[in-house]
Each structure stands twice: as C-alpha cells, then as structure tokens.
Image (spheres, rainbow, N blue to C red):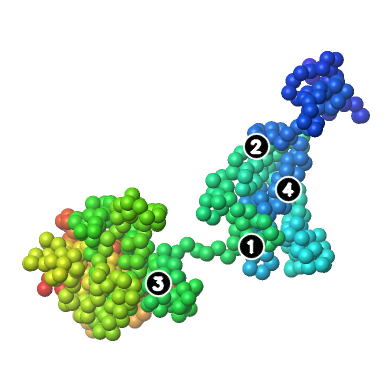
Amino acid sequence: VVRRTCRHPSALPPGRRAWSSQPRRRCVASATADDFVGDGGQARTRTSEEPPPATPTPKSNKTRDLQQSYDLIRAIICDPTQLVKAVASGKAKGHDPSWRRVEMRPVLLKKGGVKLQVVKYDERQAFTSNHNYDILATESGRANGRNTNRGRSSEGSGKNNLSAAEVTSEAFGEGFGNWRVETLETVVQIKVLKNDLAQVHETKALLSNAKGPGGKKTTLVTPGGEGSNITDHDREKPRLLSPDDPFLIAVGVSSKDGKSIKANRRDKYKQVEEFVKLVEFAVSDAVSSGSNELNWPTETRPVRLVDLGCGNAYLTFGAYAHLTRAHLKNVDDEKSEKNDAQKKKNQIFMEVVGVDVKRQSRETNSRVAVDMGWENNCVFVEGTIAEAEVTFPTPRAEDGGNASRNNPSSASVVDVVLALHACDTATDEALVRAVKWRAPLTLVAPCCHHDLQVRLKEHTKRAENGVQTSHNGQGPLMKHGILRERMGDVLTDAFRAHVMRLLGHRVDVTEWIGGEHTPRNTMIKAVRTGGGASKQTWREYDAMVAEWGVTPRLAEMLRD
C-alpha cells in the first residue's frame, strides 16, 4: 500500500518525480523494432542513453493530457479545409458550462466569405455568431496588402468580434465534458476525465462527410473558396418542383430564366407543390393499401387522373410532371437495355384530363401540353364539372363500347379525381362524379360554402320568428354573420366527409397547406374501400340532419 502511494505524483515531495515515470536505462542493446531508426536509409541501434521516440497520434481509445487533446481538435476547428462540424456538450467534473450545447461549422456567407459559425444553446433558444478564420484573414490581408488585426471581424463588437481561434479557446474554458469533431477524413471524440486528462477516440469519417458532390472528395483549396466541408449559409430548401421546371416556366409561375418563382405566383406555387406532394403520398397509400381497382400503373394500363375545374392547369401539369418522374430519380441515365427496363419498371404511367368551363383555359393548356410534348397524355376539355365528357387515349375493357386508341370512348372508369378550390357546390359536383366513376382515390380542397350558409340563415330566421326549429339552442352561434359563415364552412365539409363514408370510403380531413398561403386549406381525401357503412354511421348522419335542420346539397345530388 505504501509503495503504491509513493508512486503517485501527488504523494511525493515537491521537486521529486515518481520513479515509475523515469525512463529505464538499458544495459544491453535491444533488437526490437523501436530500436531501429531510419537515418538516411541506414538502420542503427538506439543506445541506452538515447530517449525513446515520440509517441504517435492515437487511433483508438487513449488517455492523454487534456491540453494536448484540446490542441488536437483546436487545429481542426480553426482549419476550414478540414472541419465539417464540432459539437461540445455535457459537463466535466467540477465545471458548470454557461451553455447546454455548442456547435461549430464553417459556412459560406454571401458577404464575408467563409466564417466559423458558432451556435450556442441554452435551455430555451439558440444564439448564432460568425467569426473570421485567422488563416483566411491573414492570407487575404497579405493579398490586399493590409493588416488584418489577427483575423478579427470588421463587423460587430464584443464577443462577436472574436476570431475563430479565440472563440474556440473560450469554448474550451467552459468546461464541457464531451467533444465530437467531424472532418473529411476522421471523427475525433474527446471525453474529459479528472486530473486534467482526456480520453481520445479517433475513427474514420462518416460516409456523408468523406464524399463531396458527385461522390468525389473535395476540400477548400483557396481562401474563401467552397468545398464539400463548407456549408452554404443560404441553403436551398429541397423542392418537389424546381423553379426551372419547364412546365412552371410555361404556365408563368417561374421567371423566364427559371431561376426563381415570380413574386405574385409564390402562393400558387406553394399550393401546387403541397397538393402534388399529397397526391403522390395518397396514390402510393391507395396502391399499397389494396384500394379497389387502383393497381400499380403500367404502359398498357396507365393511371387515369381527372382534374375538375383545372383553371390554368397548375395542378394538372404539376401532378403529371412530378409523378411520371418521381420514381426515376434513382435510375442511372446511362443508356442500356438494363437501365431502360428498370426505368419502365419504376415509371408511373399516367394520363390526365383537365376540365374547365372556360374555352381560353382549354386552348392555353392544350398549347402548353403541345410545347411540353405531353399532348398524347395530357388532354383538356371545355365543359362544366357536372356534365363535361371525359375521354382517355388508352381504352379499357371496363369503358364498354368499341373503344380503341384511335377511337377513345367516354370514360366510365377514373382512378384519381382532383378538385382544387372548386367554388361552392362545384365541389359537390366533383364528389358526385367521383362516386359515379367509382374512383379509388378522390382529393378535393373546397372553396367557398355559400349553399349551406344560405340554408342556415333561413333556418335561423324561422327560429327568430318563433317557429320551433331543431337548433334553437344554437341561437347565439347563428345570430352573428361571421360566426354563422364559419360554422357553415365546417358543417358543409363535415357533411361531405360523412356522406363519402356512407358510400364506402375511408375519409380523412386535414390541413394541406398553411393559412398564410390560402385560407381555403382544408383537404378531403377519400379512398374507396367498397365496404358498406355501419348502422351507427347512418344514425350519426340522421342526427346531424335533424340537429341542424338542413340536408346537404351533396346528398340531394346523389339522390337524383
């Protein structure tokens, strides 16, 4: 016990070293690999008086001096050609950091070039600051012939004016218990131990860090340049429909150069993108859930989609453009029989028909389809939602008659029915056609709801005149126009969803886009199951009709 105590440096008198820390002297020359040191290509034997060689950088769990560990990761953090991301978290023993977590990464700013971005998190929010790299500021200053003041930023003051090296040292002083530093080559993890020691663990880089664009590793090679480890500060949000998509340019949503969305079309662009995203998910869900008659589309049996009230065909073209390309993005573009077969297997074959009452819409949309080369699969007809004749190029046996590719017949089978913001009872007309077509999937986003609001208003007047009505108890709700209008909107869509359930559909009512883009953001999705409604479902419908004293227009249309 006494001998162990005396070996520990803290138990020895000042100025005296532990005997176990002194290098041992060798009496006989050793023939181990450590004793042969290359000197001009010639080997020689190390004598007993020579010190041992320097210890190499550890590649696995090793206990090292804390300051040496900090120096190791400091060199990485302060080098924008190496650092991908650094994270500090946890508490070292005896320390209480001011921040819960600190993240560092190099970013490329539009003004200022490459900076070290530091994000500090407390219990409630994050605080972000950008700092100059010493090496970049020095090289830039030399090129411009001026003093760079140790790499400090010329903008701001106080702690935001610290250089990358200074803010890194400040983070070390906080006393975090764990550090994780990712580079293009390695991942270094440090765990702070007691007695100013640290455990260092070094592994290979993550695959996402090791490869740059196109699978090739790239680094920052010039001051202020951009490499795969540098993150663009203004990251572009991933979109289903890129602004340079030809159809967005053709319909006037994007600028002519395809670099941006027109300012007065941004809300429409957002609506179309969110609707197309919902269509893609709904189609995949309907196919995978075994919906009646909706199978994976093939070249001989493409999926049939009808957009009722298509207007300028933003949704029609968007659905066709995205869905026909969505499943091809993982297939190599190299021309070969194998890849061509894979593309055909993954492709969603589709035919769409857009219906609108305006002749101008039909002519304009048909012209765009020709310009895009889609005229064989994108057809536009003029007519009302309730009565327009819908035909598809590819015939089906279910259509009946002597239909052929050259002599298409009126469709008796439609796979997907869409209706985006069809006004008032036009949405009901779209639902009626979907029911009669026995469409496996129906997606409608209702617009205004005047019909039921008028009926509620008349019912309220009878109650005010003393006539006994079923919803006399809701008098305060029906008394004010704004409340009655909003209640009419809710009741109309509630009736629509319930009627579709009665007719054998699985129905979901959701918000498909934020209210800042359009106040009409309710989506009714109906997937046909073919099953009958339960008695309880019928009782609920009867109770709603009796409670509010109105019959929904959709029910009246279906009755006719």
**Amino acid at the residue labelled 1:** Leu
Q: Position of residue 430 (x, y in %)?
A: 22, 72
Question: Marks 2 and 3, how far apart in space?
Answer: 50 Å
Q: Position of residue 232 (x, y in %)?
A: 59, 62
> Which circle, 4 or 3, is nearer the viewer?
3
- Callout 1: SS: strand
Mark 1 or mark 4, earlier in chain:
4
Q: Is residue 221 visible?
A: yes
Q: Nearer the viewer, residue 482 or 58?
A: 58
Q: Which residue is mark 2?
A: 201
Residue 245: mark in rendering: none
Residue furthest to the right in view is 15
Question: Marks 2 and 1, how far apart in space?
Answer: 29 Å
Residue 246: mark in rendering: 3
Residue pictured at 77% horizontal, 41% vertical:
67
**Amino acid at the residue labelled 4:** Ala
Name the quadrant of the N terminus: top right
**Amino acid at the residue labelled 3:** Pro
Q: Nearer the viewer, residue 16 or 1?
A: 16
Mark 2 or mark 1, earlier in chain:
1
In this figure, what is the number of numbered marks?
Answer: 4
Q: Are marks 1 and 4 in contact (CB under 8 Å)?
A: no
Residue 410 versus residue 162 in the image, above or below: below
Q: Which residue is mark 1?
A: 108
- Callout 3: SS: helix
Question: Marks 1 and 4, how far apart in space?
Answer: 20 Å
Q: Are marks 2 and 1 in contact (CB under 8 Å)?
A: no
- Callout 4: SS: helix
Residue pictured at 45% horizontal, 70% vertical:
243
Q: Nearer the viewer, residue 316 or 15?
A: 316
Residue 75: mark in rendering: 4
